[in-house]
Image (spheres, helix red, strand yellow):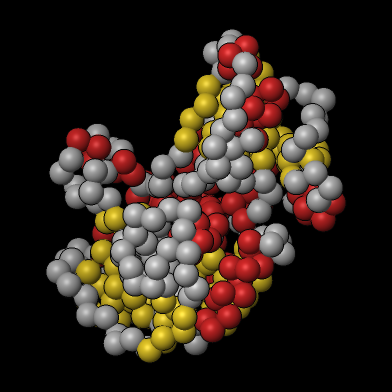
Amino acid sequence: MKAMVLDRPGGRLQLTDLPVPEPGPGEVLVQVHACGVCRTDLHIVDGDITDGRYPVVPGHQIVGTVVAGNGEGGPENGTRVGIPWLGYTCGTCSFCGSGSENLCDSAQFTGYQRPGGFAEYTVADARFCFPLPDSYTDDQAAPLLCAGLIGYRAMNMAGDGQRLGFYGFGNAAHILIQVAIWQGREVYAFTRPGDDAGQSFAKRLGATWAGGSDARPGVELDAAIIFAPVGQLVPLALKAVRRGGSVICAGIHMSDIPQFPYADLWWERSIRSVANLTRRDATELLELAPQIPIRSDVQSYALARTSDALDDLRAGRVSGAAVIVIG
């Protein structure tokens, strides 16, 4: 099979011929149709996070069909499934036992410690394969599996506030704004200063206000979700939220947060991080998505052009979601 392989942190993906993997106990073999490109893939390739296994095939927003496997109680052959970032948990630690499997001591992640989806085939833990709504094409389903799922978890953490600030308006934000507006909320979109195209994109999707991250919308926010991996945004978001408001950091990796006055945190403001996702998050979002319905702006790339997709994402040339289409 063809696969894009990363041999070391900070390396370059190489199109490689590999044997089709064989599923082990509890695993299924999936023929990949599409795989979304995530900023976390950039962090893996660029060496910002380095706890993975190398060589590795990245990619963790996988859509494909189960063609073989040993997943007792899992999806049957012929089932179209989605495979997300969280790819394995032990099921026995205190976190798994308390409904917080996203914090599992032994968690493994797709495209990082487990085989990913920038390939024609992959293997996955059958417990972490989710049947997909029939109304979604492969390229539309793929962005839901990380940008959608982790963004959905972040928005749940933000609570029921009416006014939400989204810092960074890319893949996750362009999905979550659809959920927020469907719920009757207002979204205030913050982009890089001077990013007129990004601000217009946000307004087209229904943002009440859009401006640079150095601007203020003229109202206090109930909560802010930071999608961009930029620690400097945390103090800015704290200044924008009301008393009792929260700032949710939705990225797996973020640059260092600069020092800020305690007064900006006072009045019971809070800062929280989002770690991964749970199977419950996946079930809820995949049931909700067709009701809204969520639709992604997709830029498609062939497997051999995966590095081009990452370069475009790194340079801010992707509006919405980048998806690798296999076959």
> Is residue 185 something that shows in the picture?
no
Measuring 34% from the left and 72% from the top, which residue is drawn there? Answer: 55
The answer to whether 203 is drawn above or below residue 131 in the figure is above
Which quadrant, please, contains the N terminus? bottom left
Q: Is residue 218 left or right of residue 140?
A: right
Q: Nearer the viewer, residue 132 or 226?
A: 226
Residue 58 at x, y percent in the picture: 42, 68
- Residue under the point 33% across and 44% down: 102
Q: Is residue 38 left or right of residue 205?
A: left
Relative depth, front residue between 316 and 76: 316
Residue 209 in view, yes or no: yes
Residue at the (21%, 75%) spot, across then down? 23
- In this rendering, would 125 be left or right of 80? left
Q: Quadrant of residue 265?
A: top right
Q: Is 320 positioned to the left or the right of 124 in the image?
A: right
Q: Based on the displayed image, in which of its 4 quarters is residue 247 positioned?
A: top right
